[in-house]
């Protein structure tokens, strides 16, 4: 470009800048000063800070950040103020622990003449006639509905005909279900076959495979009248009966524990839970209240966020859950142990009003915690505590491998010397030692239930819960039997005696009752040797000869009929003259 033209352009730009500066200065000089009356005028947002919509509403754009900052600052100021108020509610002066005078004379077994009872007698105190009648009526109703459905059925379908289940048959079915938990097989049908790898004669002796599967298909506990809005209506009735019967035969001692338990279930369910730290990560979550020995007193199934009926008042859901489980045991002086999922300062204060002590671990982010205890940095072995004024709620912090925050209303926080099973002594806070001693009830019950569990893989969640309730009834019965008779009996021995009673086999009987009484003809005297005889014809039969399936041929997988049987054998088995007759008696 020509240097002259560049100089002209530069002069032109400088003149434009000078004119713009002059205009800006003149506008500033001509602008009037704000008067005191302007403060009374309504605020009208400028074009940059607000945009008026068609409906006349104002949508703020740039000033939203300032509003949000102001709201955040106000919330922070409120939380700081709340923390400052809470700080004044906590002190380091110990006070007397309230004594609720728990009545020890009322705790224990409520069964008379316990020493003369067998395992089946105690089991039927919990799994009583009401439970059996509910199962029988519900199973028969569902079986009758399956028969009349319009689904296509094959010639040998199990739903083509359903015979009503009797009480004796239901007991045998439950006995075989309990026995299945002790016999590991890949499929249920394997237990009812002659496969040498899985052959168990007791199953075929009690029920046929088709009948067992038919009852299992219809097995349920849904009453005729139920609340359709209740997600647990399929198990609500039997669950209430089992819990009611358990509390009617046993009154717990002072120490109780509350925690959750998982039942494995991977099917589709609206309230199925996932807990990565559990062995059964997917499943149905049970909230359970137990004694420190593991006797299950009360339970509740998680139904989702809006599943359970809320209690009156503005109470957090976790506290509502604890109050529902502890409902029958409040105002009696019990001491409940819980982990940090349930504990809070407000819950401990509420339980104190209901004459119930509580102890357990505590989460650091719970509302109402003393900030000085939570924020304090400790060295290993140090222990600090603080008490809420006008109450006996203590919050303590102890440094072991990591910080442990605890809450208690039953003991004064102090360091005590305790020893482990190896004789090694260690200093621990008293509240932590009490928690470790009495919190293992649910873990113990879960451990024992996992050894011989009835539930099998199924897509119907209510059947899993039914078998879980059956296991709980057996476990509670076992604890009552061992505690009442003061016998050191193992769980497996108790189950074996119970199963034998349910399937009506004498406890002193041997397995020879299931084997054929076969005797070799060469070893018997002349008058007792076995010979084939013709099967007699029935009275109204038009045939000259009667035919039945050969037992030996059936055993070897062949279908063949014969006219002859062994008259000397106990059940007169039909057998072909040769070679089945000889093979059967060898």
Image (cartoon, grey):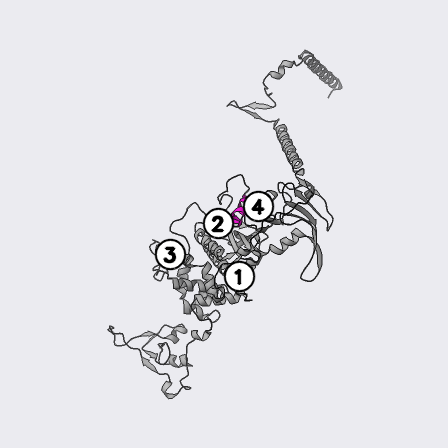
Q: Earlier in the sequence, mark 3 or mark 1?
A: 3
Q: In what element is the residue under mark 1?
A: helix
- Crowding near pointer 3: few (<14 within 10 Å), some, many (20+)? some
Q: Earlier in the sequence, mark 4 or mark 1?
A: 4
Q: Is residue 146 magenta?
A: no
- Crowding near pointer 1: few (<14 within 10 Å), some, many (20+)? some
Q: In what element is the residue under mark 3?
A: helix
Would you identify the image quadrant in which residue 131 lies? bottom left
- Crowding near pointer 2: few (<14 within 10 Å), some, many (20+)? some
Would you identify the image quadrant in which residue 43 lies? top right
The residue shown at (41%, 46%) is: 228
Residue that numbered label 4 is attached to: 351
Q: Earlier in the sequence, mark 3 or mark 4?
A: 3
Q: Position of residue 143 (x, y in %)?
A: 37, 57
Vertical relation: 416 (above or below) 65: below
The residue shown at (50%, 46%) is: 304
The numbered disc on residue 137 is 3
Q: Main secondary structure of the magenta part?
A: helix
The magenta span reads 317-332
Q: Is residue 330 magenta?
A: yes
Q: CA distance from mark 3 to mark 1?
A: 30 Å
Residue that numbered label 2 is attached to: 269
Residue that numbered label 1 is attached to: 479
Please indicate whether residue 298 sits to the left or right of residue 390 in the image.
left
């Amino acid at each position: 470009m020509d240097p002259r033209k560049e100089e002209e352009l530069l002069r032109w730009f400088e003149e434009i800048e000078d004119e713009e500066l002059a205009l800006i200065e003149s506008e500033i000089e001509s602008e009037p000063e704000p008067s005191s009356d302007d403060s009374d005028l309504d605020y009208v947002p400028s074009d940059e800070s607000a945009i008026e919509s068609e409906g006349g509403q104002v949508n703020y754009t740039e000033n939203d950040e300032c509003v949000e900052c102001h709201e955040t600052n106000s919330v922070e100021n409120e939380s700081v103020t709340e923390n400052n108020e809470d700080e004044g509610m906590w002190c380091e002066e110990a006070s007397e622990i309230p004594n609720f005078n728990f009545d020890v004379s009322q705790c224990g077994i409520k069964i008379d003449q316990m020493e003369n009872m067998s395992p089946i007698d105690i089991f039927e105190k919990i799994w009583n006639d009401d439970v059996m009648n509910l199962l029988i009526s519900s199973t028969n109703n569902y079986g009758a509905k399956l028969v009349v459905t319009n689904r296509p059925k094959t010639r040998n379908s199990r739903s083509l005909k359903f015979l009503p289940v009797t009480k004796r048959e239901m007991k045998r079915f439950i006995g075989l279900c309990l026995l299945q938990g002790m016999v590991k097989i890949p499929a249920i049908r394997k237990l009812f076959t002659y496969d040498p790898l899985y052959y168990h004669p007791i199953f075929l002796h009690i029920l046929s495979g088709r009948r067992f599967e038919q009852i299992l298909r219809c097995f349920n506990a849904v009453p005729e009248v139920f609340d359709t809005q209740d997600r647990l209506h399929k198990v609500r009735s039997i669950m209430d009966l089992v819990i009611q019967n358990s509390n009617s035969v046993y009154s717990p001692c002072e120490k109780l524990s509350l925690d959750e338990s998982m039942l494995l279930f991977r099917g589709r369910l609206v309230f199925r839970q996932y807990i990565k730290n559990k062995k059964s990560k997917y499943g149905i979550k049970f909230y359970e209240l137990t004694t420190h020995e593991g006797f299950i007193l009360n339970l509740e199934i998680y139904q989702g966020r809006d599943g359970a009926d809320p209690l009156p008042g503005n109470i957090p859901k976790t506290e509502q859950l604890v109050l529902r489980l502890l409902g029958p045991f409040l105002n009696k002086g019990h001491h409940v142990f819980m982990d940090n999922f349930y504990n809070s300062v407000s819950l401990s204060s509420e339980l104190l009003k209901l004459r119930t002590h509580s102890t357990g671990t505590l989460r650091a982010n719970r509302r109402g915690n003393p900030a000085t205890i939570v924020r304090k940095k400790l060295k290993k072995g140090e222990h600090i505590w603080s008490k809420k004024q006008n109450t006996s709620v203590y919050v303590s912090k102890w440094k072991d491998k990591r910080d442990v925050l605890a809450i208690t209303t039953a003991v004064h926080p102090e360091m005590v010397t305790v020893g482990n099973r190896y004789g090694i002594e260690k200093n621990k806070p008293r509240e932590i030692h009490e928690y470790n001693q009495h919190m293992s009830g649910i873990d113990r019950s879960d451990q024992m239930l996992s050894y011989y569990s009835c539930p099998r893989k199924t897509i119907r969640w209510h059947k899993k819960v039914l078998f879980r309730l059956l296991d709980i009834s057996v476990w509670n019965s076992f604890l009552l039997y061992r505690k009442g008779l003061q016998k050191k009996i193992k769980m497996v021995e108790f189950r074996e005696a119970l199963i034998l009673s349910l399937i009506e086999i004498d406890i002193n009987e041997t397995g020879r009752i299931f084997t054929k009484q076969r005797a070799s003809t060469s070893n018997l005297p002349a008058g007792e040797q076995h010979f084939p005889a013709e099967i007699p014809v029935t009275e109204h039969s038009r045939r000259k000869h009667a035919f039945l399936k050969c037992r030996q041929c059936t055993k070897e997988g062949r279908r063949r009929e014969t006219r002859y049987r062994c008259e000397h054998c106990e059940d007169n088995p039909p057998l072909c003259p040769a070679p089945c007759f000889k093979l059967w008696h060898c």
